[in-house]
Amino acid sequence: MVMEARTRTRLVTGLLVLVGLPLLTVAVLRTIGWDGSGWYLTALLALTPYVVIYGVLLAALALVLRRWWIGGIALALSALLAVYVVPRVTSDDQPAAHGKTVRVLAANLYLGQADPAALVRLVREQRVDVLNLLEMTPAAMSGLEKAGLFQTLPYRVLHPASGVDGSGIVSRYPLTEEDYTGDSAQKQPGAAADLGGGTTLEIVAAHPRSPDSGYYQWEQEMRDLSRAIGEHGLRVVAGDFNATVDHAALRTVLSRGYVDAAEARGDGLIPTWSTSAVPLVPLDHVLVDRRMATRDYQVLDVPGSDHRAVCAEVQLP
């Protein structure tokens, strides 16, 4: 009987340690700033806010079972991850800005399947000035034209393509196409928007390759998204990054002088993507030059798409 009890004790302890490995993995990767070397670890990192809850539940179970050291470690790792997560739900002070205000919306069209009429209606309701379109197919572009998008936003830089590769920028202001991101498997167009009065805003429609279809290319395209501020004019980078702020690759872009509009407004945990009807993680972002102020941020449903649109109102200095 004593031997059986010891065996059960060791088995329970071993199972708790095994169940705790995802928590340990996320805590280590997030702390050292490494996204792993494959899509499975990248996907796990995207779930960091959920892992915090997972860790607390694991700690509670371990303590109930009197596995004190396992419970203590699980609580400590959960607290560490909470330090990274909690700032996303608190709004930040904004820099002094008294210039023009621009509303930027980014929408992934899900292989062109998003409802064009619904998207155009959203653009008008939100008084959008600049619209970044991802996964824009020729058919989607035709549908948006028929729905009257170009009557509302007449200026455009469009690169439609089949599948996930097409992207575009549509604007209320005149656009001049610029190459801000170099070569990408999925086109990430850039444009300078002339706001009038000698004021220009640089726009990038971000859509780096998904890490599950090319991890190293995703990492490279993330690095290429923007040079440090001071090396260019005022810039907004908006779109589907296939990344959350728990990924070192996205934090590298932010470190070059950008602010995530969602985090700036305390909405950094609102999910934008899912493989089902329930959104899971925020993969879509509006990154704002830190010299600009974020006045508003919203996440909006787009019928027919597996992504929700992200919309930010920014004010130039």
Image (cartoon, rainbow, N blue to C red):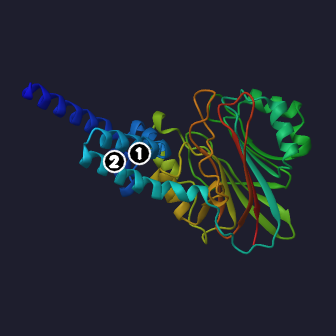
Query: How many numbered marks have been drawn onto this rendered protein structure?
Result: 2
Q: In this view, does 164 lie to the left or right of 299?
A: left
Indicate the quadrant containing the N terminus: top left, top right, bottom left or bottom right: top left
- Identify the mark nearer the N-term, 2 or 1: 1
Image quarter where the C terminus lies is bottom right
Relative to 87, is 2 above or below? above
* Mark identifier at residue 56: 1
Foreground residue, 131 or 178? 131
Q: What element carries label 2?
A: helix
**Does residue 271 appear left or right of residue 156 in this picture?**
left
Q: Residue at x 84, y 37 (%)?
A: 120
Q: Quadrant of residue 109?
A: top right
User: Dot 2 corresponds to which residue?
Assistant: 74
On screen, residue 279 versus residue 252, left or right, reads: right
Image quadrant assignment for residue 101 = bottom right
Q: Where is residue 193 in the image (x, y as percent from the top left)?
A: 78, 58
Residue 275, label in figure: none
Disc 1, SS = helix
- x, y percentage for residue 48? 46, 46
Residue 215 visible: no
Q: Position of residue 251 (x, y in %)?
A: 50, 57
Say what amino acid the circle numbered 2 marks. Ala
Viewer-closest of 285 and 222:
285
* Residue at (80, 59) in percent of width and height: 102
Residue 98 percent across, percent down from the top left: 80, 73
Q: Residue furthest front?
A: 1
Q: How crowded is mark 2: few (under 14 residues within 10 Å), some or many (20 or more)?
A: many
- Residue at (76, 52) in percent of width and height: 104
3D distance between C-alphas at marks 2 and 1: 7 Å
Could you tell me if the residues under marks 2 and 1 are in contact, i.e. CB atoms within 8 Å?
Answer: yes
